[in-house]
Image (cartoon, rainbow, N blue to C red):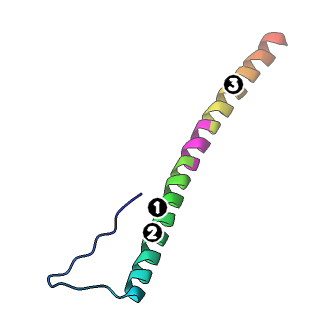
């Protein structure tokens, strides 16, 4: 959850059309931020999976040598 803050030097009541546009911009920004966060988590998960794969592969190779 976030906040989109707008201000003016003089009092101003935003018309509904502008509020609607600002709401849309805020919604799209939230979606973009969430997608970026998901992408970062996916990248981190891939790093962890690669590490696990390397570890398992190394253990597998060691077991093959021991049992050969």
Q: Quadrant of residue 12?
A: bottom left
- Quick check: 8 left or right of 65? left
Q: Residue at x 83, y 11 (%)?
A: 67
- In space, the residues marked 2 and 1 are separated at their CA atoms by 6 Å
Residue range of the region highlighted in magenta in the rendering: 42-48
Q: Which residue is mark 1?
A: 33
Q: Residue at x 46, y 61 (%)?
A: 33
> Magenta stretch: residue 43 in it?
yes
Q: Residues within 10 Å of mark 2 (few under 14, many from 20)?
A: some
Residue 29 percent location from the top left of the image: 45, 68
Q: Is residue 22 above or below residue 2?
A: below
* Nearer the camera: disc 1 or disc 3: 1
User: Is label 2 in contact with label 1 (beta carbons under 8 Å)?
Assistant: yes
Furthest residue to the top?
66
Q: Quadrant of the N terminus?
A: bottom left
Closer to the camera in the image, 1 or 56: 1
- Element on which disc 1 rests: helix
- Element on which disc 2 rests: helix
């Amino acid at each position: 959850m976030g906040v989109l803050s707008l201000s003016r030097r003089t009092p101003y009541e935003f018309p509904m059309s502008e509020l609607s546009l600002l709401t849309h911009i805020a919604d799209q920004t939230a979606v973009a931020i969430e997608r970026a966060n998901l992408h970062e988590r996916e990248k981190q998960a891939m790093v962890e999976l690669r590490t696990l794969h390397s570890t398992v592969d190394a253990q597998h190779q060691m077991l093959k040598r021991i049992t050969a």
